[in-house]
Image (tube, helix red, strand yellow):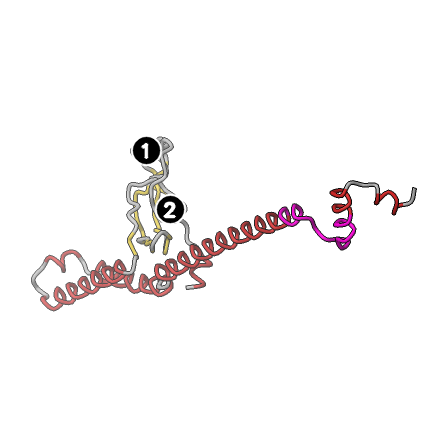
Amino acid sequence: MSDQEKHEHMPEEAQAADAAAESKPAGTESDHEVLVRLMKENEELKDRALRTAADMENLRRRTARDVQDARAYSVANFARDMLGVSDNLRRAIEAVPADARAGDDDAGLKALLEGVEMTERAMHSALERHGVKKLEPQGQKFDPHFHQAMFEVPDPSVPANTVVQVVQSGYSIGERVLRPAMVGVSKGGPKQAPAEAAAEPGPINEQAEKDA
């Protein structure tokens, strides 16, 4: 039986479906295939949009952090230079003998000393307004992140590695160490029990300072 004869003996519904199938161009998607493809494309677009939104949020956070760091640490290099001036003011104050400070013989010297002390206090206040704070390591356990050991002091009365003398003050800016404190540490005493780290500024970020 030829194809023509087979077609003539098929029910009308089957003939119509067969005719529609024959009239459909090759490679054309069915409605179901179109729906599946569109749903897949929709999921891909949604996933792409979510990734883009996440990337933008991460960029916003990084930008905000960079702006905050720039504000906090932009004066780091200048502040470090000013610490040298502050050190010289302190040396000038300490160079005056104690008896000269207590005596009333030289009113001019006392006035000069008071002026230097006022200048030192004003400089420290200005530095503090810009986030620079003085470290207070006296009596604390030595920490190489914040302190620079200059010498050891034999003293069995205090735990070993305790800061017993501050040779030069240390400073921090924000959460970073601007200059470690130069200290003398105890030697020969009992070992200190492990303790939780104090909430002190972290190690200096050299790259951030270069950027500043």
| Residue farthest toward the right in the current orientation of the protein | 1
Establish if 192 lies above or below 112: above
Q: Is residue 23 magenta?
A: yes
Within the image, what quadrant is residue 132 found in? Answer: bottom left
Q: Please give the name of the residue rendered at 15% of the width and 63% of the height, measured from the top-left corner.
A: 114
Horizontal side of 41 relative to 130 (left or right) equals: right
Q: Please give the name of the residue rendered at 36% of the width and 32% of the height, measured from the top-left corner.
A: 192
Quote the CA–CA distance across marks 1 and 2: 16 Å
Question: Is residue 17 at least partly visible in the picture?
Answer: yes
Measuring from the top left, give residue 53's x and y in whole percent. Answer: 48, 54
Identify which residue, 74 or 142, lies in the foreground: 74
Identify which residue, 187 or 45, lies in the foreground: 45
Q: Local crowd at mark 1 within 10 Å, few (<14), some, or many (≥20)?
A: few
Horizontal side of 14 relative to 166 (left or right) equals: right
Residue 151 - label: 2
Q: Local crowd at mark 2 within 10 Å, few (<14), some, or many (≥20)?
A: few
Identify which residue, 98 or 182, lies in the foreground: 182
Within the image, what quadrant is residue 78 found in? Answer: bottom left
- Helix, strand or loop at label 1? It is loop
Q: Residue under circle 1?
A: 156
Magenta extent: 19-36
Q: Is the residue under label 2 in contact with that under label 1 (CB below 8 Å)?
A: no
Measuring from the top left, give residue 106's x and y in whole percent. Answer: 10, 66
Question: Is residue 150 at least partly visible in the picture?
Answer: no
Task: Identify the main secondary structure in magenta.
Answer: helix
Measuring from the top left, give residue 134's x and y in whole percent. Answer: 28, 53
Q: Please give the name of the residue rendered at 45% of the width and 54% of the height, measured from the top-left corner.
A: 57
Q: Which quarter of the figure is the N terminus placed in?
A: top right
- Residue type at numbered disc 1: Pro
- Residue type at numbered disc 2: Phe
First in residue order: circle 1 vs circle 2? 2
Q: Which quarter of the figure is the C terminus placed in?
A: bottom left
